[in-house]
Amino acid sequence: MTERIRNICIIAHVDHGKTTLVDFLLRQAGTFAQHQALSDRVMDSMDLERERGITILAKNTSVKVGDTKINIVDTPGHADFGGEVERIMGMVDGALLLIDAAEGPLPQTRFVLQKALAQGLKIILVVNKVDRPDARTEEVVNQAFDLFIDLGATDQQAAFPIIYSCARHGWCTPDFADVPAMVQGELKGSLKPLFDEILREVPPPTVTGDAAGELLVSNLSYSDYIGRLTIGRMTGGSFKKGQKVLRRGIHESGEAHNEYFAITQVCTYDGLKMVEVPELMAGDIGVIAGNETMQIGDTIVASDQQVALPRILVEKPTLGMVFSVNTSPLSGKEGEAIQSRKLRDRLLREVRQNVALRLEETATNDQFRVLGRGELQFAILIEQMRREGFEFMVGKPTVLYRVENGEKLEPMERAVLDMPQASVGDVTSLFQARKGLLSKYDNSELSDRVRLEFDIPTRGLLGIRSRFLTVTRGEGLFSTLLVGYGPHKGDLPHRLVGSLISDRTGDTIEYGLLGLEDRGILFVGPGVPVYEGMIVGEHNKDNDLNVNPCREKKLTNVRAAHAELLVTLSGIRRMSLEQCIEWIDEDEWIEITPKSIRLRKKVLAQNSRSVKRHERIN
């Protein structure tokens, strides 16, 4: 039975065409009916994934090629979601390494490939976007080979097959000589060579588990009809509907926890749909319902004679962020003002479904610390909770240090930057100011673009992405990879300016805001509700300034010809969530509601806080 199953994942950097390739694999395998209306990027099911153009959650699908079923897992390409990647590697036996024919292997490609090679997976190299005018296909293939050797690939893994493809037009070829003709449209093609390569190169799943039935939980989902869904690969035996099985897990305290339950439903994937089956067989990736407390990493076994499989391990978090109950005067006006119990339950639910996140209690009852991989991971979680109608507050991300042999260590990352030649000087200055050390300079003679690599502390990357895009006029590519821990690099410049803070509650008035324009940059326009302690702008000096944005123009009986001239605000900086995370200091909160994102001081009363930076930060 396992001879007719193949389990693969797709490894790719952000925007290298992975989700588009899966679209065409599904279409050409006949997964969809002829009359069925299809949207692009069908695997990006979350609204946030479609809006941002990235894959956030690992998702499963399957295609039928002849009498063989190919299970495909679409994995995230961003290192912030590495926990998604690490937990699905044990579900598959092979991987498609998808690389852009112009950009070549990038850090997230390296990150996921390293995990795949360590698992001993069979890799097929797919060079995508060979139709790009700036494609350098042969050079990219050589870079991929160098990457395999650098990551310690075995001789068998380094002898990888190569497929050249154009995912958006749905064709591929194993012969590089055919590429020019296929790009010009002189030769017609399909993805059949890729299907053939998968069937030939990727081995069927090996059954290593007990014949009685065994499954390692790699993912979780939820159905309004049957409750929590457990997703994983059968490592041995089979499970049937109604069968009584044993869940081997752990408590929050770390102690072993065993729980018997009856399977209420068994499903496998058919295309994008889950279909109920009478039995889940060894080697297949499937879904089991019947237990509401299941966690990722647990093992489901058929009898108490079987032991738990090794739990899924992920790299430790490098950043922490405090989530708090909303305590502002506007709490509850635009969403659900949740109490600490509900906030904790929501964060706990996220931690259970995402093994890369951790939750810590703090000394304050209504504040919780979430530990994760990066700013983007936190921004996605915040945006999800916001769309669910919650109101809450978050603080400035802080780096998680280590102390070894009395020395303070901090996480270090490798930033790979691709940019126009003209931007090199400004970008180098930006990264060196953040304690970045230039480790590689790659200038191709065939292009006016340059690739730089910097080793930089994680602290130095906080908020640097938007500045990098500004310096490169939006033409730069930015990606990072955690490389380990190094000695503490000393103080880094963060925000050298203070805040403009409202000194009263009310609605902002244009006349009052006009008087503040010379003081700095405004974040709010007229008619916006404010309260004492709320930040309305950026001061152009290093200290904070309490201001009155609600000041009205006093009316008199005296009239002059010039008095009624229309004067408007020159400009307002609308702060996005990512910009707010970058901007705030340790003594400030970001207030999140379904309708608004506000900045405020932790201490609202102006007579209870200092305006001097060194006093309020330390």
Image (cartoon, rainbow, N blue to C red):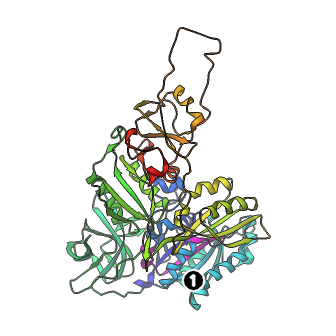
Which quarter of the image is occupied by the C terminus?
bottom left
Residue that protrudes farthest toward the top in the picture: 557
Quadrant position of residue 604: top left
Give the side of residue 578 with respect to residue 236, left or right: right
Quadrant position of residue 174: bottom right
Residue 36 appearing in the image: no
Question: Which residue is at a point 43% across and 67% down the rendered structure image?
Answer: 400
Q: Position of residue 327 (x, y in %)?
A: 33, 44
| Front position in the image: 523 or 292 | 523
Q: Position of residue 580 (x, y in %)?
A: 50, 49
Q: Position of residue 542 (x, y in %)?
A: 55, 46
Taking the magenta stretch, the answer to whether it contains residue 348 is no
Give the side of residue 266 with respect to residue 588, left or right: left
Position above or below: 524 against 195: above
Give the side of residue 45 with respect to residue 367, left or right: right
Position above or below: 128 against 468: below
Residue that protrudes farthest toward the right in the picture: 445
Label 1, on which residue? Answer: 151
Position above or below: 537 against 37: above
Q: Residues within 10 Å of mark 1 (few under 14, many from 20)?
A: some
Taking the magenta stretch, the answer to whether it contains residue 94 is yes
| Front position in the image: 157 or 467 | 467
Q: Position of residue 428 (x, y in %)?
A: 68, 63
Give the side of residue 349 with respect to residue 51, left or right: left
Provide the residue span drawn in magenta. Answer: 86-107
Residue 376 appearing in the image: yes
Under circle 1, the secondary element is loop
